Image (cartoon, rainbow, N blue to C red):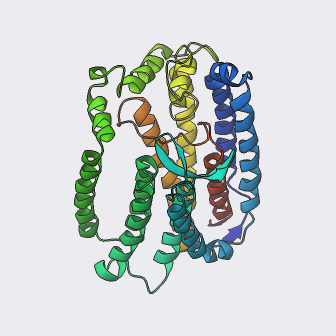
């Protein structure tokens, strides 16, 4: 196989820029009314989304030229720093409470979410670990168990915040990486049983999680409480039909649907742009995932293959869960839709992750 260094995957670049454009437009449409009443500026959230998108695109193209050896070397320090930040964020008076979780660090308007950085750092760390010739993922005590221990430690710290949504993405991505690295199915099967038991325990441990599950099966059993958000989301999706009500014409964004510009932006997109609009968005995500896994398959070395697999899988899991939640397929969890939902550090970091994917696409086998 001839090895070549070429330009970044053009298809990924186009898909990302189109998703970002749709995202900025939908953030404006979904938030304009709320932003005007709250801040006196209809473009309040849209301007910030555009700023972070521009910043993220700058860093995305910047990291496409980073030497892969540097990415390999930074894996261990990055995950150590993330573990430290996950501990610091739990300290009362240091971590910032938002939406029922102590997940943020920062001062004033500037803040970061350590769990978001941990998702990417864990991908690098596991990829480096599994690509070492001496590491045998097929051995339970010396391979599978240590990997699961590191992943479980990060998940445990995130759940102390608590943030089940981010924790689910972290574990899902890690499990896929462990599978691709060659773990035995009997080990994964045993962990799956423990995972189901643990998840059940987490749900039963918190009353609000039990209510989320019960409202998922029958949201109309508590239409003014736990079922309210899902009901309003379905009210938004239903009228969209083929072509939607038209851009800016959503009814549910007018203080009916909570968080219309963040976790539930897909509902507003469905209402305004209809089946055609959501088909275009899902197709763009499908193209991104296809090209991401294509990059992984054609990677020159195992580390690059696993990093590309991890980044693509992380994006895929977030997309599937978010769309599943807003459509009533999954219980409500706080997971944003990549590139479309309003967000600062998460959007920038996701674009950095895509930049790394583009970096790896430059060094693939023909």
Q: Split into 4 quadrants, where in the image is the C terminus?
A: bottom right
Q: Position of residue 249 (x, y in %)?
A: 61, 13
| Viewer-side residue, 120 vs 42 | 42
Q: Nearer the viewer, residue 242 or 195?
A: 195
Measuring from the top left, give residue 158's x and y in whole percent. Answer: 45, 57
Residue at 44% x, 49% y is 163
Q: Residue at x 75, y 65 (%)?
A: 65
Query: Position of 300 compared to 144: left or right?
Result: right
Residue occupying the far front of the picture: 93
> Which residue is at the front of the view, 188 or 358?
188
Left or right of 335 on screen, residue 136: left
Above or below, 363 relative to 339? below
Q: Quadrant of the N terminus?
A: bottom right
Residue 57: give x, y in percent of width and height.
Answer: 73, 49
What residue is drawn where x is 71% and y is 57%? 8
Image mark count: 0
Q: Report whether 98 appears left or right of 40.
A: left
Q: State the image quarter where residue 36 is shown.
A: top right
- Picture layout, residue 15 above or below residue 192: above
Instruction: Tell me if I can see residue 263 in this picture.
Output: yes
């Amino acid at each position: 196989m001839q090895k070549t260094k070429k330009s970044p995957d053009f298809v990924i670049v186009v898909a990302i820029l189109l998703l970002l454009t749709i995202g900025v437009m939908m953030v404006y449409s979904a938030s304009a009314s709320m932003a005007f009443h709250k801040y006196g500026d209809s473009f309040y959230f849209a301007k910030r989304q555009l700023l972070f998108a521009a910043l993220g695109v700058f860093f995305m193209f910047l990291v496409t030229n980073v030497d892969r050896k540097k990415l390999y070397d930074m894996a261990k320090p990055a995950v150590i720093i993330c573990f430290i930040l996950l501990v610091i964020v739990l300290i009362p008076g240091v971590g910032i409470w938002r939406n029922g979780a102590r997940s943020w660090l920062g001062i004033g308007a500037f803040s970061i979410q350590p769990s978001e950085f941990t998702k990417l750092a864990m991908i690098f760390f596991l990829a480096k670990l599994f690509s070492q010739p001496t590491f045998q993922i097929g051995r339970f005590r010396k391979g599978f168990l240590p990997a699961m221990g590191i992943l479980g430690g990060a998940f445990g710290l995130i759940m102390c915040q608590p943030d089940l949504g981010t924790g689910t993405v972290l574990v899902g991505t890690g499990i896929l990486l462990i599978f691709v690295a060659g773990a035995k199915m009997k080990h994964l099967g045993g962990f799956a049983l423990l995972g189901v038991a643990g998840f059940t325990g987490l749900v039963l441990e918190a009353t609000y999680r039990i209510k989320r599950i019960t409202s998922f099966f029958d949201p109309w059993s508590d239409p003014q409480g736990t079922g309210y958000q899902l009901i309003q989301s379905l009210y938004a999706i239903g009228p969209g039909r083929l072509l939607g009500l038209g851009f800016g014409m959503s009814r549910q964004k007018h203080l009916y649907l909570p968080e219309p510009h963040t976790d539930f932006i897909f509902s507003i997109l469905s209402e305004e742009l209809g089946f055609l609009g959501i088909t275009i968005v899902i197709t763009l995500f499908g193209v991104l995932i296809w090209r991401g896994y294509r990059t992984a398959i054609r990677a020159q070395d195992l580390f690059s293959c696993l990093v590309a697999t991890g980044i693509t899988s992380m994006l895929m899991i977030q997309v599937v869960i978010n769309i599943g939640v807003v459509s009533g397929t999954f219980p409500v969890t706080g997971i944003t839709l990549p590139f479309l939902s309003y967000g600062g550090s998460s959007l920038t970091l996701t674009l950095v992750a895509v930049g790394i994917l583009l970096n790896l696409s430059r060094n693939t086998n023909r």
